[in-house]
Image (cartoon, helix red, strand yellow):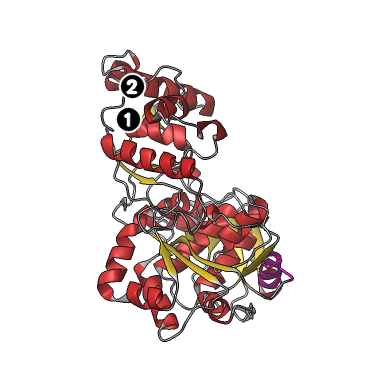
């Protein structure tokens, strides 16, 4: 890689051992990717969870040694003083602040590791947003801005909806970017790699695109069909809102590998079909109609049991609009005594929901609002029957967690299941 003066200073250790190790990692990363140089970034989003590394679950917890080894690939204990780029995080953990550790039966070592990680992030200057949706909570890059982000739906949202530029980053590369303000210039940082390649032909006479669920099902089908290609969607009869686009991002990435898409007349790099394709012909076209929609819905619903133990909603984290919708649906109702209703959102959104009266209405119905967390971290027997309005979490719970009975439907379906204790959802 061709390094600039400031990059050579960091690589030579003239800005300390920590940044030297970070630059060494990024240079190896860039070389492996075939990047010729770095690009400056002043916006980083990291995943500060360590839970894929099982050997960190032991006492005593030495978070600096753990971070050195797993963030910076160093066996030497490194004391990080401060990040260089503006950085927010997703904790990917459980909610300690609201007393939900016991609710989700989290072991003590996990609780202590989470607390240590939170303190570490705070100490080195990371904004502890604790959400998978940083774009809803103050970290909203502008069109054309180069960023280094993790998290499937966030990456797609940054690229497609905001028009920022990021690749799929991991814990290690994003942390090194936070320390150096650099990321390899390749992939979606380059304009020529952002052109749409696959035209999605939607049968709009037969299906509507006016709910979050509609967009999730479409994203699920397209993701499974085209993998890592860049789809071009038409704008439906109803202009999609941010929650609908968020759902499209989540399922396209989790059910496939979509890092970016275009929606003609909606997303900032697709004012026209010609702009979306960069003036080239799409490589392929795929169909999406009633048959594909039904197939996706049935694939996501794999339970044979109607009684529901847990309803988990808010993946990606609910927006303030969704919290308001949920409050209206739950007003004057009570969650079934045999069913647990968990609502996931960001702490900052919960604060606004509380000031607006939404949180009070939700909790008065018997639901639990969970912040700083992710539904994938629920700790219940895999025999539990789970209902969710998140196609992404359905995909993950069956594939990663081994749950055999998962229902998927709309927010309305999930509220009905929480109140009645039974699944009565259907594809409308």
Q: Which residue is mark 2?
A: 18
| Mark 2 residue element | helix
Q: How many numbered circles are shown?
A: 2
| Mark 1 residue element | helix
Answer whether residue 131 is visible to the viewer in this image.
Answer: yes
What x and y, as percent, mark residue 157?
A: 43, 55
Q: Is residue 372 left or right of residue 152?
A: left
10 Å crowding of disc 1: few (<14), some (14-19), many (20+): many
| Residue contact at pointers 1 and 2, CB within 8 angstroms | yes
Classify the position of the C terminus by image quarter.
bottom right
Classify the position of the N terminus by image quarter.
top left
What x and y, as percent, mark residue 305?
A: 72, 72
Among the 4 quarters of the image, the one containing residue 199: bottom right
**Nearer-the-camera pick, 407 or 270:** 407
Q: Main secondary structure of the magenta part?
A: helix
Q: Is residue 295 magenta?
A: yes
Answer whether residue 192 is visible to the viewer in this image.
Answer: no
User: Magenta stretch?
Assistant: 293-304
Q: Which residue is mark 1?
A: 179
**Nearer-the-camera pick, 2 or 376:** 376
Q: Is residue 74 left or right of residue 285?
A: left
What x and y, as percent, mark residue 298?
A: 70, 69
10 Å crowding of disc 2: few (<14), some (14-19), many (20+): many
Mark 1 / mark 2, whichever is N-terminal: 2
Q: Is residue 78 left or right of residue 214?
A: left
Label 1, label 2: how many angstroms apart (C-alpha)? 8 Å
């Amino acid at each position: 890689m061709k390094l600039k003066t400031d990059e050579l200073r960091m690589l030579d250790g003239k800005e300390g051992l920590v940044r030297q190790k970070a630059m060494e990692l990024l240079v190896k990363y860039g070389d492996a990717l075939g990047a010729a140089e770095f690009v400056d970034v002043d916006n980083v989003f990291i995943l500060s969870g360590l839970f894929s590394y099982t050997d960190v679950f032991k006492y005593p917890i030495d978070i600096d040694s753990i971070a050195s080894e797993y963030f910076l690939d160093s066996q030497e204990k490194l004391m990080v003083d401060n990040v260089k780029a503006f950085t927010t995080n997703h904790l990917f953990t459980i909610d300690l602040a609201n007393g939900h550790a016991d609710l989700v039966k989290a072991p003590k070592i996990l609780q202590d590791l989470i607390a240590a990680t939170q303190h570490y992030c705070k100490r080195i200057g990371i904004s502890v947003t604790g959400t998978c949706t940083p774009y809803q909570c103050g970290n909203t890059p502008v069109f054309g801005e180069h960023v280094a982000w993790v998290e499937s739906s966030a990456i797609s949202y940054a690229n497609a909806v905001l028009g920022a530029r990021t690749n799929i980053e991991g814990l290690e590369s994003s942390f090194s970017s936070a320390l150096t303000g650099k990321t390899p210039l390749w992939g979606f940082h380059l304009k020529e790699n952002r052109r749409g390649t696959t035209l999605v032909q939607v049968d709009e006479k037969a299906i509507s695109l006016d709910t979050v669920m509609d967009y999730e099902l479409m994203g699920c089908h397209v993701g499974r069909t085209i993998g890592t290609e860049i789809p071009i969607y038409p704008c439906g009869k109803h202009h999609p809102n941010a929650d609908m686009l968020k759902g499209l991002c989540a399922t396209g990435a989790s059910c496939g590998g979509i890092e970016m898409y275009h929606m003609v007349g909606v997303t900032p790099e697709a004012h026209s079909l010609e702009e979306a394709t960069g003036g080239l012909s799409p490589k392929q076209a795929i169909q999406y109609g009633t048959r594909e929609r039904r197939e996706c819905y049935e694939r996501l619903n794999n339970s044979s049991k109607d009684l529901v133990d847990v309803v988990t909603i808010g993946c990606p984290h609910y927006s303030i609009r969704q919290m308001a919708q949920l409050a209206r649906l739950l007003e004057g109702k009570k969650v079934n005594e045999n069913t647990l209703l968990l609502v996931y959102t960001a702490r900052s959104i919960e604060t606004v929901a509380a000031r607006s009266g939404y949180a009070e209405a939700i909790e008065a119905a018997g639901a639990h609002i969970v912040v700083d967390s992710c539904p994938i971290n629920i700790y219940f027997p895999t025999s539990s029957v789970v209902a969710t309005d998140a196609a992404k979490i359905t995909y993950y719970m069956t594939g990663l967690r081994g749950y055999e009975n998962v229902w998927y439907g709309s927010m309305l379906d999930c509220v009905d299941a929480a109140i009645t204790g039974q699944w009565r959802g259907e594809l409308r």
